[in-house]
Amino acid sequence: MVLKITPYLELDTEANHLIDHVNGKNISLTFSESAVLSRLLTSSNSVCSKDELLSAGWPDRVVATTSLTQCISTLRKKLDPYREVQLKTVARRGYQLHVSTQSHVKMLAVNDAESMRAAIVNVSLMVKVSGIVFAVFLLLLAWYFSDYHKVSQNLSRWSSDKQVELKIGGVTGEAQLLYKDNAPHLHPSMWEKHLDSDGDYLTSYGGFNAFVATDGTNYSMAICPGDDKQCSGNGLINITSVDSEPAGLNMKDFAELSKKMEQRIRYNRIMLPESEEGVGALIEHHYHADVYFPVKGELLIRSDISMSLIYDSDTTGEFHSSTCITDEDCLTTPIKYKIRGKFKQYSETIDDLRVDAFQVSVQQKDLIKPERLNASAVPFYRDLRKRDIKDEELYFFRIYQDDKTAVWITPLFGQVTAWYKYDKVDI
């Protein structure tokens, strides 16, 4: 007969040995040791008298009590590795076998459904509650330090619950407003004040679609001329103010100047021929934007931004970004800043606005110092220099996407919102 002592330790009364299922071994017992231990396990009383144990261990024999004392001593030595099992002496009464419920901790080593049930049922309520609390704590800790929580924290700092009415280039229209950390001063004038109000640049388009954003310091506007629901990608206007004093930018003059700058200086233009249909093993999702930074009395600064996503799964892949900065007269030779890394994509919302959030783990950064640096470009170079030293993880938010364009919030000179041209290229 096999008697269970703990979920992992049993007594075989016929073979006279202990079966250790954890370590996969048997411990030999004498007939008397096996019989005494069996009587302790099966007795209806919690304490067995010396006479009971003598009768069990030495049937039909008369032996001295020292034989029982020696038997108990050797049994204790053989049970010593199993701290949950204690053979106790009860003064003037006899002996008691005490098995702690902690023995159920080792039940995972035993393929025994009954033992597993006993381990769960027999532990105290306090142990169960403590285990549940500890498990919840570990889950919360893992979530707090997870990439998803970092993305959520960054997104939670943004709001998109407001619209503003803008007058741009002689045309009035509604713009979706995004603002960070409850930024103050959300009046349309914060974006309009840098533009010459007399311009009528956009009247021929009949309207525009727009996003405006602020991180509390910079005020960005991303404009797509036209009254179609989807952006055509023609004539995109991206202007970010980095100074509180009105710049007085005339939209007609700006339109001509920006065309010349983009035709003359295009450091980030990517000209990759498309492969034959179905041949390309990888697809590059390419985005490009020109962002202008007007400052009163300073040369107009342009940031030529190119970003590429190359997916290796539905939500992960390679990220490449290249930014080139120069001024309208080429007094500043190009400041070039390149980033390469791995991205994880998350689908989230800012209020009711659907957003694709990209967490980029930076693997490589390259900042090329220009040979000449105009005074108007110094703050931009300093910002990129600081990022080159510090940034290890970046967050990009795509707040709009159609077949030809997309609107991104990028971590550049604070937070810059711009409307990008979009295309896919087989590589």
Image (spheres, rainbow, N blue to C red):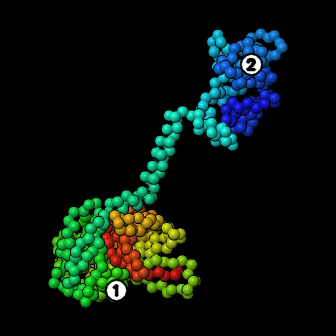
The residue carrying mark 2 is 71
In this view, 207 is above or below 349: below
- The residues tagged by marks 2 and 1 sit, at their Cα atoms, a distance apart of 97 Å
Q: Which residue is mark 1?
A: 234
**Kind of residue at disc 2:** Cys
> What is the crowding at mark 2: few (fewer than 14 residues within 10 Å), some, or many (at least 20)?
some
Picture coordinates of residue 72, whole percent (x, y):
71, 19
Residue 15, image quadrant = top right
Q: Position of residue 224 (x, y in %)?
A: 31, 81
Pinpoint residue 243: horizontal percent, then vertical percent. 21, 70
Left or right: 104 with respect to 40?
A: left
Q: Tell me: residue 356, above or below residue 49.
A: below
Task: Classify 10 Å Cα crowding around label 1: few (below 14), some (14-19), many (20 and above).
Answer: few
Q: Which residue is at the far right?
A: 60
Asked if 408 appears above or below 271 in the picture, the reply is above
Q: From the viewer's perspective, is residue 55 above or below residue 185?
A: above
